[in-house]
Image (cartoon, grey):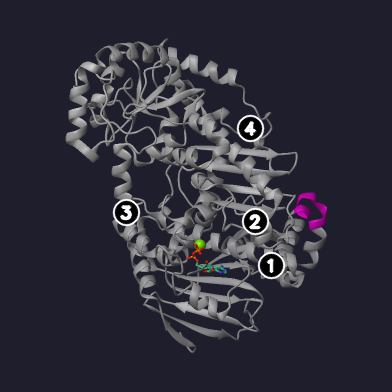
Amino acid sequence: AAGGETFSFQAEVSRVMEIIIHSLYSNRDIFLRELISNASDALDKIRFLSLSDGSQLGSGDAAALEIRVRADKAARTLTLRDRGVGMTREELIANLGTIAKSGTRAFIDQLSSAKGDSSNLIGQFGVGFYSAYLVADRVTVRSKHNDEPVSYVWESGADQTFTIREDTTATAPERGTELTLHLKEDAGEYLETAKLKGLIQKYSQFINFPIFLEVAEEVEVPIESPAGDEEAKKEGDEAAVDEAAEKAKEETDDMKVEDGEDAKEDDAKDAKKEAPKTKKETVYKWELVNEHKPIWTRDSAEVTDAEYDSFFNTIAKLPGKPLAKTHFKAEGDVDFRSILYIPDKPPVNLYNNAEAEKDAIKMYVRRVLVTDKFEFGLLPRYLGFLIGIVDSDDLPINVSREMLQQSKTLSVIKRKLVRKALDMIRGLSEKKAKDAEKSSEEEEVDMDKPKESTDADAADKKSNDDEGDKKPDPYLSFWKAYGKSIKLGVIEDEANKERLAKLLRFQTSKTNASDETDWASLDDYLERMKEDQEYIYYSSGESVESIQRSPFLERLLEKDYEVLYLYEPIDEHMVMSLPNYQGSKLMSAEKDNFKFGDKDQKDAKERLDGVKSQFRPLTKFLKTSLGDKVSKVRLSTRLSSTPCVLSTEQWGYSARMEIIMKAQAF
Ligand code: ADP
Ligand code: MG
């Protein structure tokens, strides 16, 4: 490019570009979604800034918060223009020349090893801009930021360098960004209106700003002749044509008019008969292609499943269908609307990347995006996998993050969001087999339903399912993906512990370990408890197999008491936070305080008293020989065929826990 200064891309950028171009070749369509999403972000930013300083928005054209997409077949370019916040010279260099986000390394690794569809990765890792090079061999970015006196041009042919120069042309944007993609030889399809319209409607339908696409249209216009004028007035429908042409003219700001080929032929044919009254012309006009009324402001009854899915795709930057959703309006102390989704797969790095969860819930105040990067999170850590939006009328629109953080309103919103999220998850657990085969008509969009979905309802469904043959349980997909989050919730969310405990699933001595679909809830456990059983028993080990071999289980199994198998590292922490469920105590099969229940305990005591003195020499001998290695040696009734076991003190860590803690170096 002529003039300007040349810069080198950060090494990671060149690498990312290379990978994107190679790994996403068969999925090139996504570039448009990424670029429109950037334009939308930039519009969100200027709208937010303008709240505290109205002059930021400017007037006339610049004030229109919209996105325009235009293909130029002759020049083979595709141009996207937004009236967003724009970029300063420094920002052009930093944002389009480096990757600021952490985890770039991880991204590069994942992308280069990803098999199949990796297109969902690029939105998540914040490298969407570079997808422009899937279809373009050169990209020109003209951008004007309010903080700069002039606009700048960034340009690169993806050859490890880019240039920056001042934009001195008369068409330089007043504010915002104009991206011109110089399309590759084989990317001509992205010049076609139908293709572009299809892509916008598919991927960017729920962008909250109007997206206009320039479309060519054939219109009939009257031929201007002294006689023509008179004749045109005779026929009513011709007046209509007249009007349409006028309208087209008004809607087109830089209209180009070409003579249609057909019109010329018609002219020649009809010349002898009588003078033609109209001719065909191609006019270009801007067509609105998306639905930009925020979906959450609509009545849930009027939103189709496909629309909800599509909105999910837009905000989550993920393909496919979510596992579940909830759309609701909270009224009372604080009014707000929200849509929450459970993605079908956990986001990359769910448990070790703090960034993932911060981005997940977008906060709007009166339809204006306030921030999507709450340092503190709108949802607790364990619900970090949820994706969605919250829009409140009750928050001051123009407040600092610090104030928002302390706002009482916000804490009410947070509390209600958690409740609704847990309701949604519970809904999934109650919607078993039979419902899964029905169409998804009655998903848990409960915006206008009363809050309590009746438990009678749930019980009903359950009994139905028990009769019917087994269909895959949608809750199991959830459990497999997010079970760990629920366990984390039991540990961290005291207020919702019971609700969360209801959502837990276990493999137990009564589930079939080789059946992937056979899991027990604590309610299932309670239902199956024996008449004389007082406690909920669990056993810890490193796998189902090793627990099954444990001598601690012998007598429990003899008595036909069910035992929960705990084999994930987090399980131990979790049961420590869950001393009882629905009034029944949880009891470790391995610990010293182990009991079969009070009556049993009494019988055992009698039996023990009878033989205690008989065995005293043995217990004494063992204690002296083992010394400090054990704290005491006792007779016990908990075993049947195994002569002895090592157990843990009631308040001590289990053997399993000690192994875990050593591994984690607590
Ligand atoms: P992400 O959008 O996840 O941050 P991208 O690679 O898509 O990652 O974009 C990188 C950055 O470039 C954005 O964060 C933004 O600062 C800037 N940017 C991209 N497109 C625009 C635009 N149309 N207007 C203003 N800034 C933009
Ligand atoms: Mg982006």
Give the Cα distance between marks 4 and 2. 28 Å
Is label 3 within 8 A of ligand 1 (CB to nearest ligand atom)? no
Give the Cα distance between marks 1 and 2. 19 Å
Identify the residue under disc 2. Answer: 405
Give the Cα distance between marks 3 and 4. 37 Å
Q: Residues within 10 Å of mark 2 (few under 14, many from 20)?
A: some
Q: Earlier in the sequence, mark 1 or mark 4?
A: 1
- Asked if residue 5 lies left or right of residue 412, the reply is left
- Pair 4/2: label in front: 2
The image quadrant of residue 454 is: top right
Q: Give the range drawn in magenta.
A: 232-240
Give the structural element (helix, strand or loop) at label 1. Answer: helix
Q: Is 265 located above or below residue 462 in the figure? A: below
Q: Which of marks 4 and 2 is nearer the N terminus?
A: 2
Q: For the stretch drawn in magenta, what is the main secondary structure?
A: helix
| Residue 114, numbered circle | 3
Give the Cα distance between marks 1 and 4. 34 Å
